[in-house]
Image (cartoon, grey):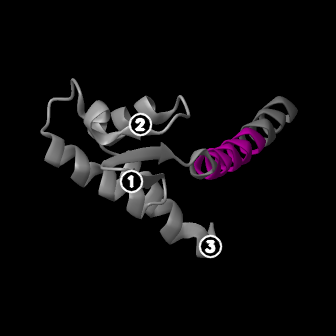
Amino acid sequence: MGADAPDLARLFSALGDPIRLALVGRLAGGAPCPVARLAEGLPVTRQAVSKHLAVLEEADLVVRTRVGRETRISLRPERLAHATGWIEEIAANWDDALARLKDHLSDG
């Protein structure tokens, strides 16, 4: 992980909230979405949604774009791919360790 640790920590921290996870899920379709539509049906105010979006933006998970008077939010899927790559790397290390343990136990 090394020098990448602070970036990954910020990324996982941003994803560690149920509202922010819901927002990422709503944006996963790929099309930019207005803040008002993202806020629909969530158990928090539109102002709270804006604060959650600011956290996601700070972690580079979303990008805001002004279109006239409207602010649209887009997901940056490459950031999720970055997190997925790290998780896959950790999983591969565990798979290797478990395979070595299995070999050791079957040899003994």
Q: Residue at 77% across / 33% down in the picture?
A: 102
Q: Residues within 10 Å of mark 2 (few under 14, many from 20)?
A: some
Is 4 located above or below residue 32 in the figure? Answer: below
For this rendering, which residue is in front, 90 or 99? 90
Counting residues from the N terminus, which is met first, the one under dot 1 or under dot 3? Answer: 3
Quote the CA–CA distance across marks 3 and 2.
35 Å
Q: Residue furthest top?
A: 41
Start-end of magenta stretch:
81-97
x, y (%) of residue 71? 35, 49
* Amino acid type assigned to the residue bearing label 2 in the image: Cys
x, y (%) of residue 106? 83, 29
* Amino acid type assigned to the residue bearing label 3 in the image: Gly
Name the secondary structure under disc 3: helix
For this rendering, which residue is in front, 31 or 97? 31
Counting residues from the N terminus, which is met first, the one under dot 3 or under dot 2? Answer: 3
Give the labeled residue for mark 2. Answer: 33
Residue 5 in which image quadrant: bottom right
Give the labeled residue for mark 3. Answer: 2
